[in-house]
């Protein structure tokens, strides 16, 4: 624990629920490793409380904070500025106070891309299938869309996948992004020649750890399968993919890299990635 003094800076996570978040662990490990006089705490904030909490944060000159479900979209209207990529994604997960102005960023998509690249997976000129069309899928697809040969978004609610695909095609001036309703037949068709499959839904997350959207017979050795779920760190989807001989990437790295990018925005310092990964791995072993 750092020595708490009258100059200790408070960073925070605002969300609901936040009790199970591992962000405090990662961020505090990073602050401690660089001997920064900072602490990071998680606060459970209901939607109707968000505006007043932001007002208090402004008055207290809190230097930075993260927001998570359900505030990633609603926070935007309380900020002074939203960085252009976060604005295009339509969601903010990181806020920094610069000279009493609150500026919003989104580090989820960039974090996911670093996680892929760090695992030696380059989406350049590949066919990528993303399951989901919510906030996480939006952030990810925004970063991946300009690189890939084709991108297929499959979602339980087909219309949100179609809308997202149309928006991305317009934004990047391409016609290689498609949105479809997630069905067994569509999965069979789309996974036949997929290079990278990404689960950007919450399916498979604790406590429903036996759930998966993809039948194991559709998984092949030539694929890379990336699951953004990090609890458990080997989801049913990843277990099945591993058994099929596919390369797998778990959600731990994305969690660490989105946090590391937030840390860098707040402190201007190079984040101690190894320390952050170690803190997370130790915590997940204990779950
Ligand atoms: P996040 O910000 O974490 O992405 P979200 O915006 O609520 O959270 O999005 C959750 C995603 O998981 C959505 O794509 C959701 O599909 P719908 O748009 O149809 O709601 C998807 N999802 C959640 N539970 C699901 C389930 N049981 N089966 C299929 N998709 C599911």
Image: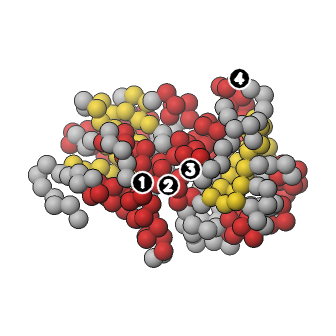
- Comes first in the chain, label 4 or label 1: 4
Residue 181, given in percent of the width and then of the height, sits at: 79, 47
Residue 66, given in percent of the width and then of the height, sits at: 39, 47
Residue visible at 12% across and 55% down?
Answer: 5
Local packing at callout 1 (Cα closer than 10 Å; few below 14, some 14-19, many 20+) is some
Q: How far apart are marks 1 and 2 (CA)?
A: 11 Å
In the drawing, does residue 174 fall left or right of residue 265?
right
Numbered disc in front, either 2 or 3: 3
Local packing at callout 4 (Cα closer than 10 Å; few below 14, some 14-19, many 20+) is few
Numbered disc in front, either 4 or 3: 3
Residue placed under numbered mark 1 in the picture: 273
Q: How far apart are marks 4 and 1 (CA)?
A: 35 Å
Residue placed under numbered mark 3 in the picture: 118
Task: Please indicate, yes or no, whether residue 195 appears anywhere in the rendered image.
Answer: yes
Q: How far apart are marks 4 and 2 (CA)?
A: 30 Å
Which quadrant of the view contains residue 236?
bottom right
Residue visible at 78% across and 28% down?
Answer: 175
Residue visible at 23% across and 54% down?
Answer: 35
Location of residue 191 with respect to 204 vertically, above or below: above
């Amino acid at each position: 624990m750092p020595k708490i003094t009258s100059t200790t800076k408070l960073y925070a996570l605002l969300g609901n629920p936040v009790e199970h978040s591992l962000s405090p662990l990662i961020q505090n490990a990073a602050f401690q490793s660089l001997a920064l006089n900072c602490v990071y705490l998680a606060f459970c904030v209901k939607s109707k409380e968000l505006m007043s909490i932001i007002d208090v944060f402004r008055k207290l000159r809190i230097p930075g904070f993260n927001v998570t479900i359900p505030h990633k979209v609603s926070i935007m209207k309380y900020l002074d500025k939203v960085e252009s990529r976060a604005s295009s994604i339509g969601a903010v997960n990181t806020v920094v106070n610069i000279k009493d102005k609150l500026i919003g960023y989104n580090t989820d998509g960039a974090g996911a891309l670093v996680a892929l690249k760090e695992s030696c997976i380059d989406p350049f000129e590949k066919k990528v299938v993303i399951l989901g069309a919510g906030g996480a899928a939006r952030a990810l697809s925004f970063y991946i869309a300009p690189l890939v040969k084709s991108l297929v978004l499959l979602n339980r609610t087909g219309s949100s996948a179609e809308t997202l695909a149309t928006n991305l095609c317009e934004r990047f001036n391409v016609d290689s992004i498609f949105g479809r309703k997630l069905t067994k037949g569509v999965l069979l068709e789309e996974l036949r020649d997929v290079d990278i499959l990404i689960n950007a839904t919450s399916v498979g997350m604790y406590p429903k750890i036996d759930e998966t959207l993809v039948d194991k017979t559709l998984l092949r050795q030539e694929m890379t399968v990336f699951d953004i779920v990090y609890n458990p760190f080997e989801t049913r989807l990843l277990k099945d993919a591993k058994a099929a001989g596919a390369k797998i990437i778990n959600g731990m790295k994305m969690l660490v890299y989105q946090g590391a990018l937030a840390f860098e925005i707040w402190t201007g310092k190079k984040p101690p990635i190894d320390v952050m990964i170690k803190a997370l791995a130790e915590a997940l072993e204990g779950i």
